[in-house]
Amino acid sequence: MINIGVKELLEAGVHFGHQTKRWNPKMKRFIFDARNGIYIIDLSKTLTQLEGACDFLAKTVSRGGRILFVGTKKQAQEAVKEAAKSCGQLHVTERWLGGTLTNLKTIKRSLGRLGHIEKMETDGSINRYGKQEQSSLRREAARMFKNLDGLRALNTLPDAMFIVDVKREHNAVAEARRLGIPIVAIVDTNCDPDQVDYPIPGNDDAIRSVRLILNTVVDSIKTARADYESKFGRKKGEEQQPEAAAAPAQGVNPDQVITPEPANA
């Protein structure tokens, strides 16, 4: 049971959709009305969908499952990162790299490379290199840290994904659908809800709207996670801590640059 109602959704502006000329007809079932050229989302349906999504995510986490949060649009980045971290889940908030899910082996090798460079910084072995090489290694590590830090514990594919703006994150959606990973997402009036297993109709542009939905989801996940830990102790996929997961993968050449190919913008 979620702890918000239509009043809270209304105050956060969750009901404001896009202009009527920028809509996806498949969202018609979630639209209440159109006013001043803007579609108004039916918040009673938002509430129902949100409750169903939270129930699914809670059940997933209560079985030891991991959730990957994705939100790379500027106004949502910090909120998505904070939400994922607060409930101990994975996140991508910078750029979705092509093959993040479908080429997991390359991502894990890149994380190994990142861990190796970080270890060199810690133990001082990076000083064996010349200044130019050190600078190059640090730039490489900074680039990988920016894109991959939220995936350090990605030892296996996530059990579900939570996405803010499926239209923008179409590459992430495509990879998840290809692999059969369930998707929970905030879907605005310009999105295709049929691409999502658990669509939550709502304003995906206003930060208050995004934060309210994220906070509600996080509360459900935290409760489920605590329940899982009380029963089983360790969390699935965390037998190896995130720091350890960043250690060099077996067979990785520490001097070889391994960077996933960015998805098309």
Image (cartoon, helix red, strand yellow):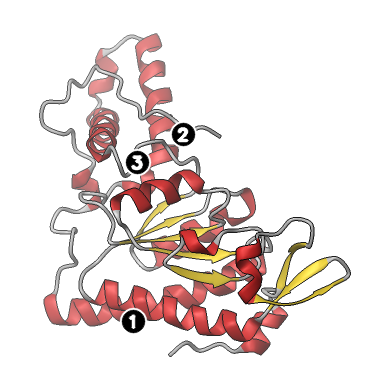
The amino acid type found where label 1 is placed reads: Thr
Q: Distance between the residues labelled 3 and 1?
A: 28 Å
Residue at mark 1: 223
**Dividing the image into 4 quarters, which one contains the N terminus?**
bottom left
The amino acid type found where label 2 is placed reads: Ala
Q: How far apart are marks 2 and 3 (CA)?
A: 9 Å
Looking at the image, residue 3 lies above or below residue 119: below
Residue in view at x 59 percent, y 66 percent: 210
Secondary element type, mark 3:
loop
Residue at mark 2: 263
Secondary element type, mark 1:
helix
Q: Can residue 233 be seen in this view?
A: yes
Mark 3 or mark 1, whichever is nearer to me? 3
Would you identify the image quadrant in which residue 90 lies? bottom left
Residue 2 placed where, x, y %?
47, 87
Residue 230 placed where, x, y %?
18, 82
Residue 175 placed where, x, y %?
37, 46
The disc at residue 100 is 3
